[in-house]
Image (tube, rainbow, N blue to C red):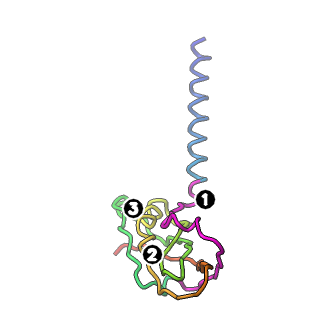
Amino acid sequence: MLLGLLGNVLGNTTQLTQKRNAKKIQKRQEGISVVCDNTWGQVGKIKKTPIKNLTQKALLMPAPEYPLTAKEQQITGTVMAEVIIDIQMGKILRAQIKSGHPLLQTAVAKVVCQATFPATQYDGPTVYVGVGVLKYNFTLP
């Protein structure tokens, strides 16, 4: 009886561990979603435009703080953040962190909304948004 109970406990523990690991993997695959401006969902007509070389077009792109744990573990690499920009305001509306080590992704998620871009004026009620990718490089000396 005791062995059967122990087997059930160990089996349940294994299942819980597998579920937790599956959630972690799913989170890594999906990345981190960041909402920078809540008003974006309340607009009318939207026109999307792809923007290439977005990182070079930023007026301001604050560098993320290198996580201490990542430094200690000598984790380096590039984090890619796919962003949606209000072209008329020059600010990021939403971001999806797509790649990179989870520790580095979290650091980027904290600063990605602070990036700004040149504003372009358009007439009319249509909201013009740009879609592109920002690259954040993490290197150790």
Nearer mark to the viewer, of 3 and 1? 1
What's the residue at 40%, 81% (across, down)? 60
**Label 2 amino acid?**
Asn
Q: CA distance from mark 3 to mark 1?
A: 20 Å
- Compared to residue 15, the image places residue 91 above or below, namely below
Residue drawn where x is 38% and y is 74% of the image: 63
Residue most extreme to the front:
124
Q: SS of the residue at dot 3?
A: helix
Residue 23 or residue 111, whichever sits in front? 111
Element carrying mark 1: helix
Q: Earlier in the sequence, mark 2 or mark 1?
A: 1
Q: Which numbered tag is attached to residue 136?
A: none
Q: Are marks 3 and 2 in contact (CB under 8 Å)?
A: no
User: Could you give the CA–CA distance between mark 3 and mark 2, rounded to whole angstroms?
Assistant: 13 Å
Q: Residue at x 50, y 76 (%)?
A: 135
**Residue 127 vertical placement versus 106 (above, below):** below
For marks 3 and 2, the one nearer the N-term is 3
Q: Earlier in the sequence, mark 3 or mark 1?
A: 1
Crowding at label 2, few (<14), some or many (≥20) Cα neighbours within 10 Å?
A: some
Where, quadrant-wise, is the C terminus in this rendering? bottom left
Query: How packed is label 3: few (under 14 Cα within 10 Å), some, or many (20 or more)?
Result: some
Give the spatial CA distance, label 2 vs label 1: 19 Å
* Picture disc at residue 70: 3
* Residue 13 point in image, percent of width and height: 56, 31
Mark 1 crowd level (few <14, some 14–19, many ≥20, 10 Å Cα): few
Residue annotated with mark 2: 137
Please name whichever residue, 139 or 53, is drawn nearer the observer in this view of the structure: 53
Residue at the disc numbered 1: 29
Q: Residue furthest top?
A: 1
